[in-house]
Every structure is written in structure tokens, then in C-alpha cells.
Amino acid sequence: MDFSVIVLAAGKGKRMKSELPKVLHPILGRPMLNYVLDAVMQISPERIIVVVGYGADKIKETLSSIKVKYALQSKQLGTGHAVRCAKGAFRDYNGKILIVNGDFPLIRSETLKGFVENHKKTNTGISLLTAFLDSPEGYGRVVRNGKGDVIRIVEEKDATPKEKMIKEINSGAYCVESSFLWDVIGKIGSKNEQKEYYLPDIVNIATQSGKKISGFIVPDGEEVLGVNNREELARVEERLRKRTNEKLMLSGVTIVNPEVTYISPRVSIGADTVIYPNTFIYGNTKVGKDCKIGSSVWIEDSEIGDDVTIAFSSYIIKALIEDKSKIGPFAHLRPESQILSGAKIGNFVEIKKSKIGRGSKVPHLSYVGDASIGEGVNIGAGTITCNYDGFHKHETIIEDNVFIGSDTMLVAPIKVGKGATTGAGSTITKDVPPGALAIERSKQQVITGWKRKTKGKKGNE
């Protein structure tokens, strides 16, 4: 589409009571600004300019993987001033400009596309995105004349009792011809209580100059809900969660209790997978079909195959889990963990940057870090790969069909050959040849006739 976009993201958001810029507050694990940019990028604008101010460096760092350009609003003097700060990015541009707020996380790309297309069709100087809300408190009201034409926007604090009864609100999104925008933006004044330049004033100025204004009504009013405080943040997350869960359930996923299940919109889940309550699945996670994801599980930026079971209270970050594997309960898979098909990671096991081979088992109470585990390996309870010497991390290699006895300490760098065995309670510091048995234990001593002294009493005299 032949248009460009300005995203307003410069404000601190004082009512959030936070040092974090408002637009970076997370919703289902992602900053709210990212949802706006997702919707914008799906309709392919010519350029995207993000106006930053408070916390500009944090915002740029967050968006480092996204191709956008920035304009700086060094002093936050209102939305009109923010748009004016973006003018330099459009010196070589003559066309339509879509202006949206960065705290607009429920907006759909289809809505923005329809809004821009309607602006082209009506051939007006300014189009504004409006919605009807049952509770319009806090929003500017859209005032129309007897013919239904938009004539002005009145902020709630300036509205008369009659105007406050208007249900149609201004969302804060506009589509404007660039030549008209840069002309009218310089005419906005700051004669108000906050001494700020308000972008909605461009509508009132346009009316006074005889320009026609188009109001595009969003069918679903929740799309334009903004976020100004923590209560509104929770409300928006609730609606996005509901929207996401409904879409998944209609695609064949069972969500036992969608009211307490939190899944990011970008997550992909296959049919006949069952998600139990109090579970969080965030980021770019992909879950296959016929899986069972237990209660109180956290999964982020991970890939999970088909017919995988992840039991109660497991924590999984940036991991790969192949088909028919079983994880948990109480398992922790850290980044770069690879659990190959049919493997089992049991309760109170932590895996870090390691590959666990097909059909291998780490059933309970073990730590495996910086390791490569072959196929058909059994890791006994209490085993630890001692991968850190205080300065560097070292690798442990365990080849196929190895049996590691309980409470074995494997001091890396070390290699245990194919089919080897370690005795329970051993500290293994040297490579173990294939098929060998490695035992390292001090000699057991038995002292007969010994009696443990009881506190406060002397031994037999």
C-alpha cells in the first residue's frame, strides 16, 4: 500500500508508576509496542517512523531486530509535538501518513488496512479512526453535525454534560495527506492546562479551514482500547488472551481452563494437544499435535514436537524437544537444550546447553550442562556434570548405551565411551574407555562395638 506510518512511542506513561517506558510494558510476554508494529508491518507501509523520547535507548534495543527508523522527541510536549518531531523523516515523501499510538496493542492489521483504504476512497484531508464504547470515560468524543460529518473532537475535560453522553470516541489514530499534515501541525497551539500540543486539534483546525473529515468506525470497539495504567494493562491482556485462546480452541486445541491459560498470539499449537490450567506459553514457541502440557508449566521460545508430555511445574526456555519425549514434573530446560525423540527428563532435573540422545533417560535429581549424551543412555539419580572450573565451561561426552550410576560426578572435560558403566557414588576425572566399568570410591571402614554418645550423657564407665 502506498502510505507510510508514524508510531507515537515517546511518552513515559506517568500513570503506570514505572521507570519502564509505557510502550515496553509486557502483554502475554511481549512489549505492547510490538503488537502495534506487528499490525502495521502486515500491511506493508513504505516506511515506519517510531517517535521515541523517554527511554529511547531501551525502546531501540527492544526493536533492534525490526526494520524501523526513529525520530526523537527530546521533550514530551504532547502528541502534536511528537508528530512534528517526525517531520524530518519525511522530507522526500509526499503521500498518505497513518498515525497510530504505541499503546494500541489490540488493533488488528485488517482494521488498519480498511482504514487506509477508506481514506483513499473518501479523498479527504484527514480520516480518524473512531469506535463506540459503552463506557467512553477518558476518551475524546467525536462530534458530528446533522449530516453525520465529523466536525470536531472534544476532550473529556472540556466536554459539556451533553457531549459527555456521546459514545463515539476518538481512538487517536489518523490518516492524513502529508502536505496537509505538515501545514496544519504547525498551527496547533498549547493554550491548555498541560501546555502541550494535542494532535486531535488538527481535526478542529481542518474543520475551520473547510476541509472534509472522514470518521472510520471500528466494528469491534475493544481494538482501540489504550493503556494508561496497570489496571488497563491487565484489562487489555485479558482480552488479548481470550482472543488468542478462542482461536486456538477453534483450531482443535483443548484448553482445559482458558481463563487461567496464557498464550502469546504468535505461538503455534497443533490439533489434539491439551493445555492444562495455569500454563504460560510465550514467544515464538511451536507445539506439535497430540501433546499434553501440564499445569503450571512455563514455555518460552521453544520448539516441541508431536506426542510430547510436559508434566507439572516444568520451566522451558529456548529448547528443542522432539517427538514422544517426556519432560518433568519439576524439570528445567535452559537455552540450547536439545531433547531428542523418545528421551525422558524427569523430576528435579536441570538441562543446560546439552543434547540428550534418542531414548535416553535422565530420570531425577540431576544436572547436565554443556554435555552431549548419546542414544539409550541412563543417567542415575544425583548425577552432575561438573562443567565449570571457576574460569571456563568444559564439555562432557557420553556415548551410546552408557549406564551412569547414581550420584556420579563427571568432572569435565571428560568422555565416557560407548557401553561403559560408572559405579554409584564415583567421581570420574578421567576418560572411560568403551565397555569399561569406572569406580572411584574410598575404602569403607567398619568399626565394631562403637556406640554413639547421647547428648548430655557420658559413655559407659
Image (spheres, rainbow, N blue to C red):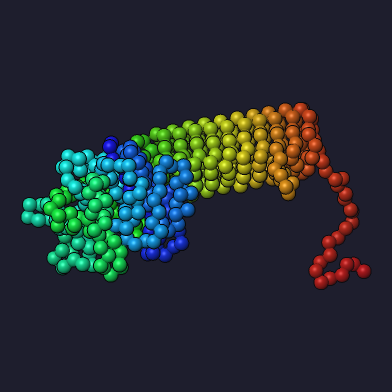
* Relative depth, front residue between 343 and 318: 318
Relative to residue 165, is residue 315 drawn left or right? right
Q: Residue at x 40, y 43 (%)?
A: 68
Where does residue 162 sit, x and y in percent of width and height?
Answer: 13, 65
**Dividing the image into 4 quarters, which one contains the C terminus?**
bottom right
Q: Is residue 416 above or below residue 294?
A: above
Residue 369: quarter of image: top right
* Residue drawn where x is 40% and y is 45% of the image: 69
Would residue 64 be found to the left or right of residue 381 on screen? left
Judge whether residue 399 can be spotted in this image.
yes
Please provide percent x and percent y for residue 215: 18, 49
Foreground of the two, 267 or 290: 267
Please state which of residues 137 and 440 is positioned toward the viewer in this rendering: 137
Q: Nearer the viewer, residue 35 or 71?
A: 71
In the rendered image, residue 54, in percent from the top left (x then y), is placed at 42, 58
Q: Tell me the residue at 66%/30% (across/down).
A: 374
Compared across the picture, whether 449 is left or right of 17 comes to right
Residue name at image x 37 percent, y 61 percent: 76
Question: Where on the picture, by quarter, is residue 232?
Answer: bottom left
* Residue 147 x, y percent position in the rendering: 7, 52
Q: Residue furthest front?
A: 91
Tally the marks: 0
Hey, which residue is sitting farthest bottom in the picture? 456
- Residue 242 in view: no
Identify the image quadrant of the N terminus: top left
Outermost residue toward the right?
461
Left or right side of 304 for 404: right
